[in-house]
């Protein structure tokens, strides 16, 4: 069973390897922005060539495999830190790495987390049920983002699905 400490250690280790060229995304980033939900893996986006990602991981003693991505995601690097699986992806939406926020984890560790606008765009771009639920919950926590996000959701053809989550009485 993966613990919160395991996830934090894995996130911290991968974040240190990627440095300013990587940001935490996925379930842990959603939690960092105020909607805490269960996850058992660690996801990053890196603004590096896939070869550089693999070289950095190898130099740090973390074996990793490159997988062909799906759709227009060119690649995904998969690996493990202990029992925790991690994925590193290329940016599939424009991200401002300089706007990442540093979040303190347990034991004084810190990671760079994608900014809220970038996280919402990533979630809308992915468009899966969990992604849209995450986006809806984040928008409930940060309603000031709704007008900024609506045109993005419309551009991805996800506004109606997102709006149904936003209006779902079970989420109140």
Image (spheres, rainbow, N blue to C red):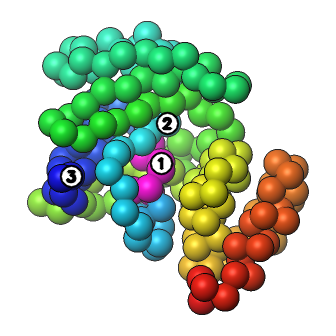
Instruction: Name the spot of residue 118 as percent of width and height, x first.
Output: 62, 51
Q: Is residue 108 visible?
A: no
Structural crowding at the residue carrying mark 3, measured as other residues with C-alpha within 10 Å and reported as few (<14), some (14–19) or many (≥20)? few
How many angstroms separate mark 3 from mark 2 (CA)?
22 Å
**From which residue to which does the magenta span run?**
21-29
> In the picture provided, is 97 more to the left or to the right than 44?
right
Structural crowding at the residue carrying mark 1, measured as other residues with C-alpha within 10 Å and reported as few (<14), some (14–19) or many (≥20)? many
Q: Is residue 88 above or below residue 164?
A: above
Labels 3, 2: front one: 3
Q: Secondary structure at mark 2?
A: strand
Q: Secondary structure at mark 3?
A: loop
Say whether residue 156 is magenta: no
Q: Is residue 66 above or below residue 135?
A: above
For the residue pair 46 and 97, the one nearer the viewer reads as: 46
Q: Is residue 106 above or below residue 114?
A: below
Tag 2 or tag 3, which sits nearer the N-term? 3
Instruction: Name the spot of residue 1 as percent of width and height, x first.
Output: 18, 53
Q: In percent of the image, x 71 and y 77: which residue is there?
A: 166
The part of the image, by quadrant, that contains residue 96 is top right
Q: Secondary structure at mark 1?
A: strand
How many angstroms separate mark 1 from mark 2 (CA)?
7 Å
Q: Is residue 66 above or below residue 163?
A: above
Instruction: Name the spot of residue 110 as percent of width and height, x first.
Output: 26, 53
Mark number, residue 2:
3
Tag 3 or tag 1, which sits nearer the N-term? 3
The residue carrying mark 1 is 25
Q: Is residue 145 visible?
A: yes
> In the picture provided, is 161 more to the left or to the right than 88?
right
The residue carrying mark 2 is 45
Q: In percent of the image, x 21 and y 22: which residue is there?
A: 62
């Amino acid at each position: 069973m993966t613990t919160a400490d395991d996830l934090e250690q894995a996130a911290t280790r991968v974040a240190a390897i990627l440095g300013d060229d990587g940001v935490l995304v996925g379930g842990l980033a959603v939690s960092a922005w105020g909607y805490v939900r269960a996850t058992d893996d660690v996801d990053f986006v890196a603004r590096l060539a896939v070869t550089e990602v693999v070289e950095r991981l190898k130099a740090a003693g973390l074996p990793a495999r490159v997988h062909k991505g799906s759709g227009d995601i060119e690649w995904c690097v998969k690996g493990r830190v202990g029992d925790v699986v991690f994925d590193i992806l290329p940016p599939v939406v424009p991200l401002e790495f300089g706007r990442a926020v540093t979040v303190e984890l347990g034991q004084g560790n810190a990671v760079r987390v994608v900014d809220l606008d970038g996280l919402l765009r990533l979630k809308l771009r992915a468009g899966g049920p969990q992604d849209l639920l995450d986006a809806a919950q984040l928008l409930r926590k940060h309603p000031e983002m709704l007008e900024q996000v609506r045109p993005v959701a419309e551009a991805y053809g996800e506004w109606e699905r997102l709006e149904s989550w936003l209006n779902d009485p079970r989420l109140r």
